[in-house]
């Protein structure tokens, strides 16, 4: 470690760790595009079924060859069933701006449908044109099965990760303070990745079972983010925090890499393979994490003495270095919950996460449904904005740390400037996306620029949380995460409601306008009322320890004095007795 600084190695492991953490979050966002039968596919399926049931050669003749094959397959099933078929047809068509038939509602009751469906909403993709080559429904491979989940059900599945994610935010900070970030962050990521192995089997069982599994994944991985702030407070000098916190945005690079990579996996193979890859990669990262990462510089066996002295001198008395496993001192809960700087960071995180999760979670569906991109293009276009986010975060962090070192701006004003970019400016770009996103080129440009500006969060509220209270940074980030994570499932729910049977540009415009309102509103509040100076309650434990020490010192001083007084009195009494004896004998 003499040539490479330990905190440089730490940056890379944290960077990859957050990429893995977000890989767990977003893998379903891209795979659901291939897991679910699209609106267009269902339209084709219903049209083919209708033509088959009509028993009119003219109707079949008007269908494309692939649909005639699908129709004949449907007919074979009906012949196989040898049962009475009752059919009620009601067809309504609406056309989007791209001229694609969006919806055909058809109600049919056939033995074939009973054969082809189950309580989980599973539907073989026999009617998909490019998959009509399957000779029989019976031979459809496990990997080729799709699910007939509507937009509302998809919204529940996508948002379920965050339903319990908030529950473990505060415990994550508390556990890391007591047992160390190495254990808490490492296991949270590793267990989340191992659960990915179960997703394919659970999805085939029932979409509600998948929701339960995603809730558990979110619960476990919720420990990770607040745990990391405990490590940052113990390792990183104040004037290097903006740069180091960019490691948290390994999540962005992870998205930028994993979205297109997963797209190619699904193009050449199956969505099932995506989850196997996630489990394997998470395990490899965890092994590296165990070997290279330690909870404090003093515990690191390979760090240089010069680096340890530099870190300890830079941190000074602002951070208490209790060993993991030691009893944590009292937490000033009242002071934290009544702190205006804490709540301004919470508000900024709320708006920023609403914007990030809306764009991150819904981008694959938006590009596939509204702009008709194929799965490879969807992966690339969904990942590109997050690569730009990481680049912008790194550049802005260097600028912020330069302003701090040269004292050209106060710490508070630097955090406000960063938040103005990641909330207010980003919100304005999302407004432009809402009104001009019907153009494919404009949509990808605005989405990329909006997500890019969110990179300033590493120099804004994320760094500010460590600034105001390094001793309780994990707990404060836990509070922020507990509230800030709520948009993670509220936003997908709103998207599901707005787009249910209405996948149009107009419905997506309202999705983006709501997102912009959250961003701009939270950003304005932060700029007006935030403060990033070290708070008095940060040394709560120190003051408690000082009082205890003073009491012990006082006891140590008083007790010997009392003992000495007793000895003196005893000696005086003995002397008086001897004097009396001498007088009596005289």
Image (cartoon, rainbow, N blue to C red):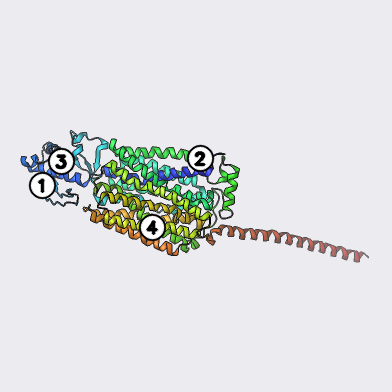
> Which residue bears the numbered disc 2?
292
Earlier sequence position, callout 2 versus callout 3: 3
In the picture provided, is 547 more to the left or to the right than 33?
right
> Which residue bears the numbered disc 1?
87
Earlier sequence position, callout 2 versus callout 4: 2
Marks 1/4: CA–CA distance: 53 Å
Badge 1: few (under 14), some or many (20 or more) residues near its Cα, within 10 Å?
A: some
In the picture provided, is 87 more to the left or to the right than 151?
left
Mark carried by residue 112: 3
Earlier sequence position, callout 3 versus callout 1: 1
Q: In this view, does 140 lie above or below 213?
A: above
Marks 3/1: CA–CA distance: 12 Å
Disc 1 versus disc 4: nearer the observer? 4
Q: In this view, does 457 lie above or below 127?
A: below
Q: Position of residue 419 (x, y in %)?
A: 42, 57
Q: Is residue 236 visible?
A: yes
> Which residue bears the numbered disc 4?
423
Secondary structure beneath label 1: strand
57 and 407: which one is in front? 407
Marks 4/3: CA–CA distance: 52 Å
Earlier sequence position, callout 2 versus callout 1: 1
Residue at 51% in and 47% down? 180
């Amino acid at each position: 470690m003499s040539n490479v600084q330990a905190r440089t190695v730490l940056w890379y492991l944290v960077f990859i760790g957050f990429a893995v953490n977000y890989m767990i979050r977003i893998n379903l966002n891209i795979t659901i595009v291939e897991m679910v039968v699209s609106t267009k596919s269902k339209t084709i399926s219903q049209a083919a079924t209708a033509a088959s049931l009509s028993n009119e050669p003219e109707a079949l003749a008007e269908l494309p060859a692939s649909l005639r094959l699908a129709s004949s397959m449907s007919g074979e099933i009906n012949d196989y069933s040898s049962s009475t078929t009752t059919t009620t047809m009601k067809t309504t068509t609406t056309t989007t701006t791209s001229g694609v038939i969006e919806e055909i509602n058809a109600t049919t009751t056939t033995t074939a449908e009973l054969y082809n469906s189950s309580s989980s909403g599973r539907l073989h993709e026999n009617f998909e044109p490019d998959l009509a080559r399957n000779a029989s429904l019976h031979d459809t491979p496990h990997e080729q099965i799709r699910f007939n989940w509507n937009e509302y059900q998809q919204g529940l599945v996508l948002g379920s990760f965050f339903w319990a994610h908030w529950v473990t935010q505060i415990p994550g900070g508390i556990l890391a303070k007591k047992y160390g970030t190495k254990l808490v962050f490492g296991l949270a990521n590793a267990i989340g990745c191992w659960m990915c192995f179960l997703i394919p089997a659970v999805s085939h069982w029932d979409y509600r079972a998948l929701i339960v599994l995603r809730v558990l994944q979110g619960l476990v991985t919720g420990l990770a983010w607040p745990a990391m702030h405990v490590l940052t407070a113990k390792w990183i000098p104040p004037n290097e925090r903006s740069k180091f916190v960019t490691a948290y945005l390994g999540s962005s690079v992870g998205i930028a890499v994993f979205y297109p990579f997963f797209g190619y996996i699904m193009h050449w193979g199956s969505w099932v393979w995506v989850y196997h890859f996630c489990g394997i990669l998470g395990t490899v990262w965890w092994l590296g994490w165990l070997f290279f990462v330690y909870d404090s510089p003093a515990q690191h066996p390979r760090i240089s003495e010069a680096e340890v002295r530099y870190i300890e001198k830079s941190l000074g008395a602002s951070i208490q270095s209790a060993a993991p496993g030691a009893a944590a001192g009292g937490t000033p809960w009242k002071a934290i919950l009544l702190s205006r700087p804490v709540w301004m960071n919470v508000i900024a995180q709320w708006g920023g996460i609403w914007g990030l999760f809306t764009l991150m979670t819904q981008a694959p569906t938006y590009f596939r449904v509204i702009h008709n991109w194929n799965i490879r293009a969807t992966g690339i276009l969904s990942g590109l904005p997050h690569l730009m986010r990481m680049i912008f975060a790194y550049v802005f962090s260097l600028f912020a740390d330069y302003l701090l070192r040269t004292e050209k701006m106060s710490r508070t004003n630097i955090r406000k400037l960063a938040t103005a970019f990641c909330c207010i400016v980003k919100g304005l770009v999302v407004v432009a996306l809402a009104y001009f996103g019907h153009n494919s080129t404009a949509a990808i440009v605005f989405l990329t620029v909006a997500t890019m500006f969110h990179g300033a969060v590493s120099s804004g509220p994320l760094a500010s949380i460590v600034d105001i209270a390094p001793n309780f940074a994990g707990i404060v980030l836990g509070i922020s995460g507990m509230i800030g994570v709520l948009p993670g499932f509220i936003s997908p729910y709103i998207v599901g409601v707005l787009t249910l049977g209405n996948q149009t540009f107009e419905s997506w415009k309202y999705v983006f306008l709501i997102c912009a309102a959250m961003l701009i509103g939270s950003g304005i509040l932060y700029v007006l009322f935030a403060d990033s100076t070290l708070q008095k309650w940060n040394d709560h434990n120190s003051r408690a320890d000082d009082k205890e020490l003073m009491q012990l010192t006082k006891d140590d001083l008083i007790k010997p004095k009392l003992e000495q007084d007793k000895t003196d009195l005893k000696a005086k009494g003995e002397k008086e007795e001897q004097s009396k004896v001498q007088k009596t004998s005289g």
